[in-house]
Amino acid sequence: MSRAVIEARGLSVRAGDRRLLHDVTLDVPRAGVMALMGASGCGKSAFLRALNRMNETQPATVTTGSVRLEGVELYGPEVDVAALRRRVGMVFRAPQMLPGTVADNVAYGLRVRGVTDARDLDVRVERALTRAQLWSELRDRLGDDARALPEGMQQRLCVARALALDPQVLLLDEPASALDPVATARVEELIASLRGELTVVIVTHAMQQAAHVSQTTAFFHQGRLVEVGDTRVLFTRPREKATQDYLTGRFG
Ligand SMILES: Nc1ncnc2c1ncn2[C@@H]1O[C@H](COP(=O)(O)OP(=O)(O)O)[C@@H](O)[C@H]1O
Ligand SMILES: [Mg+2]
């Protein structure tokens, strides 16, 4: 088994005549947490979204190059994109709660996939909430309206919803940037706990957060990958000037 679960090769993303991402070659290590960093607009989200073919939900977006997941090309003509998005789950900046209860939200993807047995759903909902460190808080509130929960809890519920589908990879796009420090800490704790279980790729602007949750950091600048390496090494001894400037706060 290769150490990389995802291998991006010469990956470029355009939207109309705008270049979002240019010629990125990057391996995502298995069962670890990789942070994507860089100034706003540098292509972090475009890269993240290329990993489960979300860019193509935007009009006029063209992706070239290759992304392999466990050695299998994601941009091949035969790929079942819905199935891919279950294997490579995603959580966005703002919690996306669906109408309905806590349990409905966690079970949503399972129902879409055709799981209908109530007992089976209960077991999977409990397991997902446990992995998302929410079971003790929400076990007596499974019938509550999910949209009435505090935002930080909603965000962890989004993680639980993704985990319910047993993804191999979880993509997180600034999952804590709308949250207060206490809620942020809970989300970070959760992400750190997933290490070893599945592969996580997280976009973040916070060095502290990257240092806390990730083992590897990839730094982007103007649509290109500038450097990638061990998070601690990259933060203390960046090789490239663009990384040094970002880390010392000269832009970003
Ligand atoms: N659908 C789109 N159409 C045109 N430009 C886009 C689109 N999506 C993103 N962009 C632009 O592409 C660049 C990279 O975007 P993005 O990957 O979202 O950056 P980041 O997540 O690093 O802030 C930005 O300048 C952004 O404004
Ligand atoms: Mg972004």
Image (cartoon, helix red, strand yellow):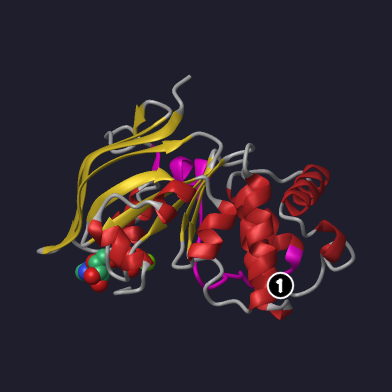
Q: Is residue 99 magenta?
A: yes
Which quadrant is home to the C terminus? bottom left
Could you tell me residue 96's position as x and y percent?
56, 70
Residue 57 can be seen, yes or no: no
**In the picture, residue 147 is in which quadrant?**
bottom right
Position of residue 197 relative to residue 15, above or below, is above
User: Residue placed at 55% from the left, 62% from the top?
Assistant: 209
Q: Is residue 123 left or right of residue 184?
A: right
Viewer-proximal residue, 23 or 122?
A: 23
**In the picture, residue 250 is in which quadrant?**
bottom left
Could you tell me residue 186's position as x and y percent?
70, 65
Could you tell me residue 87's position as x and y percent?
51, 41
User: Residue placed at 57% from the left, 71% from the top?
Assistant: 95
Magenta-highlighted residues: 80-102
Q: Residues within 10 Å of mark 1 (few under 14, many from 20)?
A: many
Q: Residue furthest left?
A: 17
Give the SS element for disc 1: helix
Viewer-proximal residue, 238 or 159?
A: 238
Residue beneath label 1, please?
Answer: 146
**In the picture, residue 82 is in which quadrant?**
top left
**Mark 1 belongs to which amino acid?**
Ala
Q: Is residue 19 magenta?
A: no
Q: Residue furthest top?
A: 1
Q: Is residue 217 left or right of residue 102?
A: left
